[in-house]
Structure formats: structure tokens, C-alpha cells
Amino acid sequence: MPLPRSADLSSDLLEDFRLDTAEQLPRCEQLLIELEHAPKSSERLRELFRLVHTLKGNLGYVELGALMPLPQAMEDVLDALRAGRLEFDSLLGDILLLSLDQLRALIDKALGRAEDHPGQPQLGQLCQALQTLAMAPAQQQGEIRRDLLQQLDPSTRLQAPQLPPLSQTDTLLARHGIAAHPDLQFFAALTEAAEQRSSYWQGRNLRLLDLALSINAMGGLAEQPAQLAAAVCLHDLGMAFLPLELLHKQAHLSREERRLMQGHPRLAGDLLKRMPDWAPAMEIVLQHQEHADGSGYPKGLRELEITPGALILHIIDTFDARTHERAHQTLSKRPLLRAILEINSLAGQQFSAHWVDVFNRTLQRQPDLARN
């Protein structure tokens, strides 16, 4: 696009324009740097919008109207930021800084102070790209930002974000209809690390997750699946912080050792207390050692006072301890049938009779769950 020349304008008008621009462009750049540290600052966004708008108007006064689409496109982006349709980050900051630099170069050229630069993007393409970004839905904005930055500065080397490969836990959760979530991935990673503390624990979390979520599904999804999954991952995290000699003790536990063991749900409960979105999971963790008849701990709750997820977790926790060796248990590993009979013999006492029935039906439907 041919740029206008300023030869016919009065020298006073041009000098005023130069002085104003020499103040406005650096201030715009400073505000963009500040926004990187305070991206929600409505005051800075408002000032930046006002300065760009003023720059656009001044271009009209000095007959550089052909350049006005660029600050207008920048206004569109800033307006989307103010309306919450875009979020400010360092990538968008770079885009706007480079756009300002393009505007400065175009003004200098129009005023006869600079020559063409072969690497400059076409004005029309740049304006169109900025306006496309301002109107783009959230799921498309990342790719548009990367393409736009590449257009403004071809020397930039941006690597598209790589999604980590799905873990076994992610795959299992997806099979149960639970979408990948950063918190759940974090909880699973904590558990996987804790499982390395004792050879008796390795693979346990995946077994418990599959069985718990299957029982919950068979029982009509009485518990939110994601909350139940979080509780399963974290319910025994506190055990990993107990001394190994206690964890691996084969003989009966002393009263003090039992007290330490029984206090283990508090650690995960305290961690989840700091994450309000996982309050139901916290309740499951804190209640998973309560008994249907009120003889459990820590509060001696009865079945109607215990969340369904905790009733499920108590059954599968005991079942896994009976079918897979666990060092701190005084009972040795039991045959599968014996473990199922033991769970059933305690229905209505230690375990909820309703959830024992659902447990039985789940294993009848999916016998492989008991053989993992």
C-alpha cells in the first residue's frame, strides 16, 4: 500500500505530531511491560486504549489516514481484553509491542525519516490478523497468537505446546468418563511417587481406582466420579510419611503405632482443605475409616452420616489389603474367595450392606477387577 507523504503539511503541525508521538509510543510500550506483571490492571488497559485511540486520531490530523487501520486493529484487541474475551499474557504483549514498532516504522517512513524495511509485514495483512485475534473464540486464540507473532517477527522460534502422553491413570479415568484434569493428574503423580516408598503398594492405586469407580457406576453414581477418584488417589498419602519400620512391621501394632496409623487421613484432608473444589473428596478421605455400625474412626459416624464414596472406599481398601500383601496387616494374603466372603460377613457392621451388595454385583459383572 503506498504511504502518504507529509510535504504539504505545515511544519508546526508536523512538529506537534512528532512530539506527541515521541511521548505516546514509549508510554504505550511501558504500559505493555507493566501489564505483563499486572495483566488484570483495568487502569493500565484504559490508559493504553486511550493512547492508541489518540495516536489514531492524530494520524488523521496530519493526513496519514492510510495508517489508521493499524491503531484501529490494536484498539480492537485492547477492547477484547477489556471485555474479557482475550487474556493478556507475554505472547500478546510481544504482539502489541511489535505492532507499535511497525506503526513507528510506518510513521517514520511517511515523514521521510526512514526507508522500506524488507522484513516488514504488509499493513493490511497485519490489521486483518489483529482483528481476527480480537474476534477469535478462546480455543483458537493460542494458535492465532503464535502465527501472528511469527508474521511480525519471522526470526521468532515458537514451539507449540506438547501435551504429555496419557498415563495409565489418565487412560483409566477416561475409560470411566472422567476428563483429564490438572489436579487429578497431580494427585495421581503424588500417589505414584508414594507407591515407590514400599514394594507392597506398587500398582495399588490403579486397582483401587478401577474397582471404586466401577462400584460407584454400578450403584448409580452416588458419588461424583472425579471426587471419588481424587479421594482414592490421596486417601493413604499420609501413610507414606510414616517410618518404614512401622510400615513394614509384621507383628501386631502397639497402641502408639496404631494411633499413628489411624492419623494418616489427616494429611490428605489438610491438603485438600486448601483446594475448595475438592471438598467432597476431602470428606471421603476423612471418613474412609468410619464403619457402618459406628465403630470406626475418627468420629464414630454411622452409615447414614458417611458419604457414599467413603463407604465404597472402605470396602475396596479392605478387599485390596486381603487380596494383595500389605506389610502392616497382621493377616496374611487371602485367597480371592476368602476375601469376598470376609467382606460379606461384615456387611451391616464394618461395611454398608447396600454397598457390599453393589460390590458383589460389580465383581460378578466384571470378575477381572478382582484379579488385577
Image: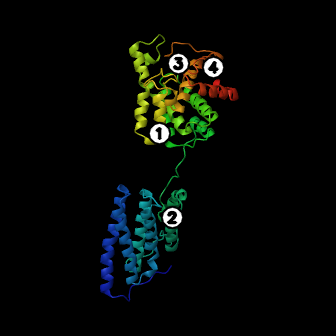
Q: CA distance from mark 1 to mark 4?
A: 31 Å
Mark whose residue sits in front, 2 or 4 = 4
| Residue 307 seen | yes
Q: Earlier in the sequence, mark 1 or mark 4?
A: 1
In the picture of the structure, the residue carrying the numbered disc 3 is: 326
The type of residue carrying mark 1 is: Trp
Residue 230 in the image: x percent, y percent? Answer: 51, 35
Q: Earlier in the sequence, mark 2 or mark 1?
A: 2
Dot 3: within a 10 Å radius of its alpha carbon, few (fewer than 14), some, or many (20 or more) residues?
A: many
Q: In the rendered structure, which disc, 2 or 4, sits on the residue that comes first in sequence?
A: 2
Instruction: Calculate the distance from the C-alpha at mark 3 to the C-alpha at mark 2.
Output: 56 Å
Q: Earlier in the sequence, mark 3 or mark 4?
A: 3
> Which residue, given by chain and number where applicable, does mark 4 sit on?
340
Q: Nearer the viewer, residue 349 or 44?
A: 349
- Check the image and name the residue furthest to the right: 365
Determine the secondary structure under disc 4: helix
Label 4, residues with CA under 10 Å away: few <14, some 14-19, many ≥20:
some
Q: Which residue is mark 1?
A: 278
Q: Is residue 20 left or right of residue 169?
A: left
In front: mark 1 or mark 3? 1
Label 2 vs label 4: CA separation? Answer: 59 Å
Q: Which secondary structure lies at badge 3? A: loop
Circle nearer the N terminus (1, 3) = 1
Location of residue 250 with respect to 265 vertically, above or below: above
Image-based side of 276 in relation to 172, left or right: left
